[in-house]
Image (cartoon, rainbow, N blue to C red):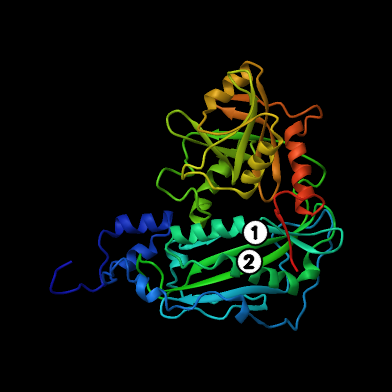
Amino acid sequence: RGAATQPSLKMLFRPNVLVPRFLGSSALSTILMCHTPAVSLLSGHRGAASMTSLANLDVGKLQIKQSTAKKTIPTFDANLPFGKHFSDHMFEVEWNNAEGFAPPRIVPFHKLELDPASPCLHYGVQCFEGMKAYKDSDGKIRLFRPDMNMKRWFASCTRLALPTFDQEQMIGCIKELLKVDANWVPEQDGFSYYLRPTAIATSSTLGVVPPSEALFFVIGCPVGPYFKDGFAPVKILAESKFKRAWPGGTGNAKVGGNYAPGLLPQRLAQEKGYSQVLWLFGEEDYITEVGAMNIMVFWENAQGKKELVTAPLDGTILPGVTRDSILELTRAWGEFDVTERAFTMGEVVKAAEDGRLIEVFGAGTAAIVAPINGIAYQGKELAVPCGKDGKAGDLAARLYHDLCDIQYGRKQFSNWSVRVE
């Protein structure tokens, strides 16, 4: 581009390169940006001095608009699908870099209206959370460790240069949403109400810069048990070609950009008969995560001691709430070593060959624990022990029941279960 003039867009530069790339990926934003003036990387946010005058999120200013067209609440049975039947209301609050947070609102569930130039649509400036609410035996709604979800959501927003928020105020807003849609929270054991807090950049300008406007919202839906007929162990494919995350990236943030690239490897694994992908990293094939879950390996280590091991939070691993809960709970038991360290697929293969591998399972909000009974690696399938009944090992089953007891308020542990008063 010349310094004195800007060219028109009547002619495309190297269309034989741009068009095929667009057909293979969403490069339209790249084409449009060719005619976008340069903008300072700091233009989306004000300086520290002016930020202090911006309005903070305040649950005390919450406005509630009741829906006049109530939906039919689905039957809470084994046929209840995940993520389909959303409740009557949603929470939303807007932010901009001139005024800060607007008064938060609980409003009837509705579709979003976005500017086509919104950064969340072009540059992936969006992040989200996954958390659940439960009803205890007294019919009271409970949240499981909401402070951990807010801490992680705050960190994800920070990583994407989205505005951050007062975490206690956000929890207060979510509690109010639960009160409004209390009838949508199932009472049956094994059922829960799934919450999806989300933050998206909504500025109406193209350009890879921090957003000047954003929208925070929370939607929710009732969900049934992950395993409808008891534990159902799965076989997974250890993936060496595709990578989920890398040092300095966003592996430790819950951003949409971490999930879309995993869809193709997952589909390819399923075509080979495997339910999920075991993500490996480096020439040493370090074990990181499985699918969208953290992974836990229980074995007798090379020193002859029973050990529960999982990958460390080195910046490539998502700090799962269930992961942290399992580590805290098992350390409190004091029955075996609990370790966070880098370990390889080769170590797992050796443990299996030596008869030291006890069980392997995924850990996440949706399933709590997901037993694994086989791992395909380098053309061979490794058999993984899965308990006496072949469905779940003793540790996975114990953790599942203990965590359920805490989530439903039947047992207290470190004030993890928080009643919505």
Q: Which one is in front, 35 or 311?
A: 311
**Residue 312, percent from left and from top:** 52, 38
Q: Position of residue 406 (x, y in %)?
A: 76, 50
Determine crowd level at label 1: few under 14, some 14-19, many 20+ residues with C-alpha closer than 10 A. many
- The residue that appears at 59% across and 46% down in the rendered structure is 292
Total marks in image: 2
Q: Decide: is 109 above or below 224.
A: below
**Residue 163 drawn at (x, y percent):** 46, 68
Please, which residue is most extreme toward the top here? 354
Marks 2 and 1 in Cβ contact (< 8 Å): yes
Q: Secondary structure at mark 2?
A: helix
Position of 274 with respect to 183 (left or right) is: left
Q: Amino acid at mark 2?
A: Ile
Q: x, y percentage for residue 130? A: 63, 57
* Residue with the mark numbered 1: 146
Q: Nearer the viewer, residue 140 or 11?
A: 140
Relative depth, front residue between 100 and 257: 100
The image quarter containing residue 1 is bottom left
Q: Residue at image x 78%, y 67%?
A: 184
At label 1, which amino acid type do we have? Pro
What residue did someone put label 2 on? 171
